[in-house]
Image (cartoon, rainbow, N blue to C red):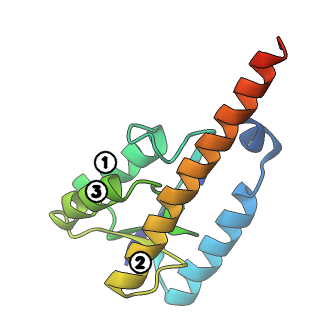
């Protein structure tokens, strides 16, 4: 199978420091080689939120799928692709038309298990957003 390896970090600071990008790529390359898959592309979205469906790397994955160049895109975790169940389901359905799958090393291989991982990722995103807003309000009250 021909695959695109997909890595993502969500903050500019993580992207600048290379936080986990190399580790993600090492894990993906190792897995792809173990499976005997051909790596067609290595795609990175550095500094992009998983809530942004128009991030350049994700669009590159979709383009490769539409062009018939890949059978799958592989990430270390399902939440590297999306932290929205709705966007994930819509993309899965769109890619199905091209015979392409979004795969992750933490996929359970079971609809219920993968759905729970997606739900947890969305919940985690909401909690992170709430913590960030609380911090901003705290700073604003202090006049910072």
Return the mark for residue 33. Answer: none
Return the mark for residue 91. Answer: 3
Task: Residue 45 in the image: state x and y as whole percent.
Answer: 56, 45
Identify the secondary structure beneath mark 1. Answer: helix
The first of marks 2 and 1 along the sequence is: 1
Task: Residue 3 in the image: state x and y as whole percent.
Answer: 43, 69
Could you tell me how many numbered marks the image carries?
3
Task: Residue 27 in the image: state x and y as whole percent.
Answer: 67, 74
Return the mark for residue 63. Answer: 1
As drawn, which residue projects farthest toward the top? 143
**Mark pair 2, 1: CA separation:** 25 Å
Q: Nearer the viewer, mark 3 or mark 1?
A: 3
Q: Quadrant of residue 69?
A: bottom left
Q: Nearer the viewer, mark 3 or mark 2?
A: 2
Residue named by callout 2: 114
Depth order, front residue of 108/16: 108
Q: Is residue 11 above or below residue 4?
A: above
Q: Is residue 9 above or below residue 52?
A: below
Label 2 crowd bin: few (<14), some (14–19), many (20+), radius 10 Å: some
Q: Residue at x 39, y 53 (%)?
A: 61
Label 3 crowd bin: few (<14), some (14–19), many (20+), radius 10 Å: some
Residue 7 seen anywhere in this rendered image of the structure: no
- Image side of residue 59 versus residue 20, left or right: left
The first of marks 3 and 1 along the sequence is: 1
Identify the secondary structure beneath mark 3. Answer: helix
**Quadrant (top left, top right, bottom left, bottom right) of the N terminus:** bottom left
Q: Quadrant of residue 93?
A: bottom left
Q: Is residue 130 above or below residue 87?
A: above
Is there a contact, CB below 8 Å, between mark 3 and mark 1?
no
Q: Nearer the viewer, mark 2 or mark 1?
A: 2
């Amino acid at each position: 199978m021909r695959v695109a390896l997909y890595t993502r970090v969500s903050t500019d600071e993580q992207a600048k420091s290379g936080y986990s990008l190399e580790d993600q790529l090492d894990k993906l390359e190792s897995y792809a080689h173990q499976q005997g898959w051909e790596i067609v592309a290595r795609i990175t979205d550095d500094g992009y939120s998983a809530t942004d469906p128009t991030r350049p790397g994700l669009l590159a994955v979709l383009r490769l799928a539409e062009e018939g160049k890949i059978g799958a895109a592989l990430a270390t975790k399902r939440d590297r692709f999306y932290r929205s169940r709705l966007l994930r389901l819509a993309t899965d359905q769109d890619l199905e038309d091209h015979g392409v799958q979004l795969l992750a090393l933490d996929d359970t291989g079971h609809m219920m298990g993968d759905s729970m991982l997606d739900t947890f990722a969305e919940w985690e995103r909401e909690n992170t957003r709430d913590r960030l807003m609380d911090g901003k309000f705290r700073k604003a009250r202090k006049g910072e």
